[in-house]
Amino acid sequence: MSLKPVSIRHQTEHVPARVEFVLPTTGAESRQLLAQDIAEIFKGRRLDSGALAALDDVAKGNLLRLDLAIAGLLLAETHLGELMTAANLDPRMQLSDIGVGAQELDAMGKALSRLLRVDVNVSQLTPSAAVKDVIALVRNQLAPPPNPVLQEVLKWPSYPAETPNQVDAATLGVMAIEKWRATCRFGLVAGRLEEFRDLIAADSKADVSALLALKQEQIPAFPVGVCLLHRTWTNNLFIDFLAGNPSILRSVSGIGKTLLYTVSNIAVTLKAPRIWAETSSLSAPVYEGILKRPPGSIGDQLEIRLEEAERFIRDTDDRWNALVDRESK
């Protein structure tokens, strides 16, 4: 399931664009799937209450205790005759001291690759390495490659800003990235629309966040705009931050409308009763224009009910289709 294609106005013409989910900043597609896979290996293992508590935290998406889980995974996957608990494993202990040789290291590397969905290379480790070296190696290999969306948005404040809107856009963009990074570490995040639905199916009160990036091939600036949103525990959608690339705000229009259109489609897909957002003195008039509401009707809080979101989608689809028909003649 993919997001619907969109359109924005570049200079004097409407051009096709697309909105994409930004992948969560983990080595696997989802922190939750990673945590569940790590926890799965411990089913039926003899672990003490401290280790089990830590693994329960990991299974719920809290990777702050991932070191403990990896240490336990090391023991579980090497099939030691006398299984020590992960909680009692000294990170400074050499692998050879717990019966891990070259063959066991190779088996462990393959197991980690299978469970973590990345190619974990342990060939540089020897039995004389310490357990902490294994943990460090796995953590380094799970580190995600630099994300071009995040890197670019963090540069927005360095662009020349001649208007309050440009300053506001740069600030909101950076705030979106900083919150997204924190949420990737501590919260539930979705990198696809299907993942949104899967996480909600697993927990009907799940608070799930997503970062959207607007792209257009003919416009060098990337991304054209970003939107951070989250699904609340009551199944509403809240727009945390929505911003356009400040370097192109004077030549490109419709960024806010396009991102709100995509958020509205997500709301319809999730059957979210409302879309919420906090507005500013700059953004409130923009939302009034997008939604065709009277001037001054939106205060510091925007609320879009599902019925209005559906109507906004239909009206936008009709307008874009009419523009395509006109420009094709």
Image (cartoon, helix red, strand yellow):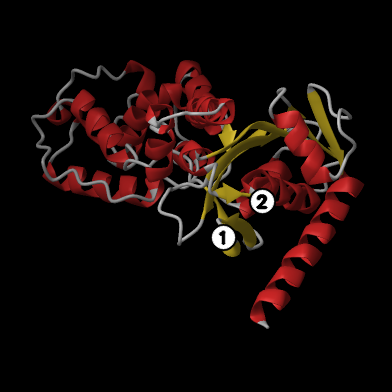
Assess whether mark 2 and mark 1 are in contact (beta carbons under 8 angstroms). Answer: yes
* Element on which disc 2 rests: helix
Residue 322 location, quadrant: bottom right
Task: Relative to 318, say whether 286 is above or below.
Answer: above
Nearer-the-camera pick, 285 or 97 = 285
Disc ID at residue 258: 2
Nearer-the-camera pick, 111 or 135 = 135
Three-letter amino acid code of the residue under disc 2: Thr
Q: Residues within 10 Å of mark 1 (few under 14, many from 20)?
A: some
Disc ID at residue 17: 1
Nearer-the-camera pick, 132 or 159 = 159
Residue 293: where, in percent of width, then height? 88, 40
Residue 126: where, in percent of width, then height? 9, 37
If the image is split into quadrants, where does the N terminus sit? bottom right
If the image is split into quadrants, where does the C terminus sit? bottom right
Nearer-the-camera pick, 236 or 176 = 176
Q: Residue furthest bottom?
A: 329
